[in-house]
Image: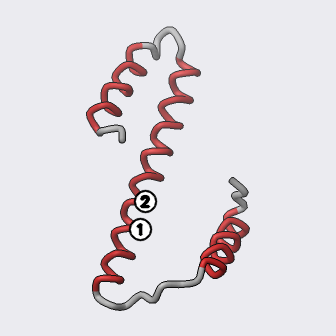
Amino acid sequence: MVTQEEINALLEKITQHKDTHPNLMAMWEHYLKLKVDAVNSCYKSCNEILSEIERGNQDDPSAESLIALTMIARAIRGNTA
C-alpha cells in the first residue's frame, strides 16, 4: 500500500518538472488526484458498510445480487471499466 508520504513525495517530484513538462505533469497530477479520491471514497464506503454490519443492519446479499447491482451502477455512471 502506498502511504500518504509517498504520494506527497511523488507530487513534489511532479512539481519539480512542471516548468519543463507542464502538460505531462498536469495530466499526472490530475490523474493521481482522481485515484487518491477514488481510494478515499472506497475506504469510506467500506467503513460505512462495516459499521452497518456491526450494528446488525446489513444482510449478506447473494453474489448474483452484488453482480447485478454493480452492473446497474456502472450503467448509470456510463463506466464499463
**Residue 52 vertical placement versus 30 (above, below):** below
Residue 7: horizontal and vertical position, in percent?
A: 35, 33
Q: Is residue 12 left or right of residue 20?
A: left
Q: Is residue 68 left or right of residue 7?
A: right
Q: What's the residue type where badge 2 is placed? A: Ser
- Residue at horizontal 54 percent and vertical 84 percent from the top: 61
> How many callouts does the rendering have?
2
- Residue at horizontal 35 percent and vertical 38 percent from the top: 2
Residue 69: horizontal and vertical position, in percent?
A: 64, 76
Q: Is residue 74 left or right of residue 35?
A: right
Name the image quarter holding residue 9.
top left
**Residue 4 vertical placement versus 19 (above, below):** below
Q: Which mark is residue 41?
A: 2
Q: Are marks 2 and 1 in contact (CB under 8 Å)?
A: yes
Residue 75: horizontal and vertical position, in percent?
A: 73, 68
How far separated are the C-alphas under marks 2 and 1?
A: 6 Å
Q: Nearer the viewer, residue 7 or 55?
A: 55
Disc 2 element:
helix
Q: What's the residue type where badge 1 is placed? A: Ser
Q: Quadrant of the N terminus?
A: top left
What's the image's color scheme?
A: secondary structure
- Residue at horizontal 35 percent and vertical 83 percent from the top: 53
Look at mark 1 in the image and give the residue it sits on: 45
Q: Nearer the viewer, residue 29 or 61?
A: 61
